[in-house]
Amino acid sequence: MSIDLSQFFEVFFEESFEGLDIMESELLELQPGEPDNETINTIFRAAHSIKGGSGTFGFNSVADFTHVVETLLDQIRDGQRQLTQQYIDLLLQSVDCLRDILSALRAEEEPDTEQAQLLKAEFNLILAADASQIIDATPSEPNLGGNLSIGWVISFKPGLDILKTGNEPLYLLQELAELGELTVNIDISDVPALTDIEPEDCYFKWTLTLVSDCSKAQISEIFEWIEDECEINIHGLSQSTNVENDNSFSGQEIPVSKSAIESSMRASNASAQQLNNFEPVASDAEINIQHEIKAPTSNQKKSAKQTESGSIRVGIEKVDSLINMVGELVITQAMLTQLSEGELDNNKLLSLQAGLAQLAHNTRDLQESVMRIRMLPIGSIFSRFPRLVRDTSKKLDKKIELKLTGEQTELDKTLMEKISDPLVHLVRNAMDHGLESPAERLAAGKNETGQITLNAYHQGGNIVIEIVDDGRGLNTKRIREKAISNGLIAETDDLTDDQINLLIFEPGFSTAEQVSDLSGRGVGMDVVRRNIQALNGSVELASKPAEGSTVIIRLPLTLAILDGQLLSVGSHIYIIPLINIIESLQVKTNAISRVGGELDVLKLRDEYIPIIRLSDVFSHQGSSDNLEDGLLVVVENDNEKVGLFVDELLSQQQVVIKSLEANYFKVDGISGATILGDGTVSLILDIAGIVKLAGLNKSNTVFANQTGSLESATV
Amino acid sequence: MNLESLNAQLTDSQDLIDNADVAQYLTFLMDGEEYGIDILKVQEIRGWQSTTPIPNSPSYVKGVINLRGTIVPLLDLRQKFNLPKVDYSAVTVVIVLAIEQDGVDKIIGIVVDAVSDVYGVERSHIKYSPSLDENLNRQYIVGLAEVNAKTLIILNLNQLL
């Protein structure tokens, strides 16, 4: 009997990613030298379950790779080797690598195993060295500071016509092997189909691991002749061996012997020359491994599919409380049924009313609990930042301390997935542009270490996320200059500093060359704002020169609920998301001009705002065509303002968004539907769609140019 | 018209194991003709209720209703089939159907004059309608069947939207 394992894949992936997160956060806690046993154990357990799972489900590449990771961890755990910074870095790289492979597998794509191969080679090298260490390190015999053993990983890809130029890779490899112990991995993934093989071409790539104390120059020297005809990359392997009092590798069996190298070479040469179907004859394990590695498809940089995972892991206590509530609901229902039997007298009526009140209470509780199931603590996003800060601070050569608060704050799972990219962007910006270099900070009388704080909390029906840095703040003057030179604002415009700072969210500030120019935060801030607005959220910015900046993101607790303004057009009731509305006003005819005989334009302060009649775009009857009889709701969409002509504004309320597409189609100008208190359905307006319906596209007519210049005059 | 008993009957029929030879059809009346739809597609039967119109939609789309939290469009089958319009009354009935359109499961409601009965019809007894080629609506018609000396028009409403 065979069981279809694929039904468990999703659970496996979820658990594995969870395991990787644990590994990462624990690794970041580790200090070289004296590892905390509990931490190592936790990491080991996580790695072990990934290995077990991937073995069970047949993801052998993952299992093989995790195996070496686990072996190293095991030795650290048993005290057989000291924990060094090198190991921590290597393990962190492995976590990244595993994450990439698993993401690819989850998206049912061919994973890119090149990185895994390099890392694995590195692990093998360390582990091989380890064996000698364990054997030699008897208690009576302290480690003798032996030779410095440095290894190199060389990726070597000769050009196609290397053989035609009279060069023979085999000799190069043999020469390399003379420098030390050489492990050879051949990658035959580029070999074309038999019919396409050019016998005089060389299709192979090699990953070579050289254990030797030779210098990089010595290796380069070997490849010197063919430098121009090949791609070659030489990485240092184990700098740690300098730090560690390591033993020499003398007398150590390295997995691959020289003869194996030669046989692999012979096999590969033979296949190319004889136009044979390549099937390297060598029986060596190292080479066989290569067979398992399928050629990475030509498009290695495939973006991971944006699959929203279909399942959700819920804390058991949430489920328990749900079950309790359903229990109470059943009891209340039984009570009500009982009361409805027989004659209804006054007493019973009172009990009935009490029962109904209880029912209402139960229902509300139940609703809240069900909503909470979708809520996850924001800590799961925050937890990726220690790593980001660690890596970036190294790259930028800055000292940065990251503080996280409010990790327990919960928000909707869907929102969580969508907010993480903008957050990463903002944190990166704060590190890159916000914080000064240690020297600058000292000069400014600040602590050398810059601080970035991520904070989340609830406020009303919103979740607020703050990104605070104590850096140099925004350079308001230069932003202003930039904005003037970009034509965003006019020289004469009198704007407050806050207003000017907000300009960094304008698209005009988003091109790369302006970053260096401005030394401010510019890259893609407009994208950040757009993404957040797409989630019905908003961004604010506060900055003080020399003291730092704070970016404040406000998001609704869930995507399924929005603050809406109800309004009526004729007999129809529509809802506009409150966040779109700038103001509502009654107009006098003298403020209206009719452009080109069909488009009404309102002059509002310094702006001309096109007016859209909802009854026109939706082809139904409004109460009146006269603009003075109704109201204008000025809404903003993509920095473009339009006035919607409606009969009347009704109440404001939070509405639950329901899909119209689920059972019908996408309707232009409508983003969804909701159910009002009386059970009727009301449609939610999509401002961008309405602008499109009304034919007010930016590309449309002379009008576009006008708004363009008008906008720039008044932002 | 007792909707409750109809719905109860509906639930019973859906419990029946799908017999390969005999299919159960719920029939309804429209402009004097009796139409049948696969009972397994029928979710429930409701009375007419007022709808929220959808802007810029075809005239046979009467709008959407709130069906216990789901937004469900109601279609007037008379108008869709180009039959003469009638005013909705107390006996106007909405049949809620689970259809599959272009691979997507959707819930829609159709407005019909009245619900009639549930019949088991042997599949082999369904005959193709002679003039289907000229009939604009033939894409919705599976065929004709005779039950109790009456002719049923058997519909497939998957592509109705």
Image (cartoon, rainbow, N blue to C red):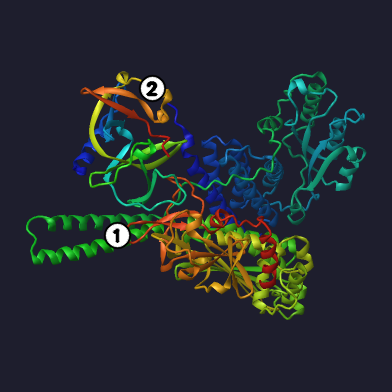
Of A652 and A602, nearer the camera is A602
Residue A356 picture location, percent across and down: 21, 62
- The image quadrant of residue A642 is bottom right
Picture residue at 66% right of the left edge, 63% below the top = A525
| Quadrant hosting residue A369 | bottom left
Q: Which residue is mark 1?
A: A363
Disc number placed over residue A253 in the picture, else none = none
Which quadrant holds the N terminus of chain A? top left
Where does residue A64 sit, x and y in percent of width and height? 61, 38
**SS of the residue at dot 2?**
loop
Tell which subunit mark 1 falls on: A
| Quarter of the image that includes the C terminus of chain A | bottom right
Instruction: Answer above or below: position of A52 versus B24.
Output: below
Q: Eyeballing the image, is A499 above or below B114?
A: below
Tell me what residue is drawn at x 64 percent, y 46 percent.
A97
Front-most of residues A106 and A626? A626
Distance of mark 1 from mark 2, alpha carbons? 55 Å
Comparing A482 with A427, the one in front is A482
State which chain disc 2 sits on. B
Q: Are marks 1 and 2 in contact (CB under 8 Å)?
A: no
Q: Which residue is mark 2?
A: B131
From the viewer's perspective, is A600 left or right of B78? right
Mark count: 2
Whether residue A29 is visible here, answered yes or no, is no
- Tell me the mark number nearer the camera, choosing from 1 and 2: 2
Q: Amino acid at mark 2?
A: Ser
Indicate the position of residue A343 as horizontal and vertical percent values.
6, 58
**Crowd around label 2: few <14 · some 14–19 · many ≥20 (10 Å):** few
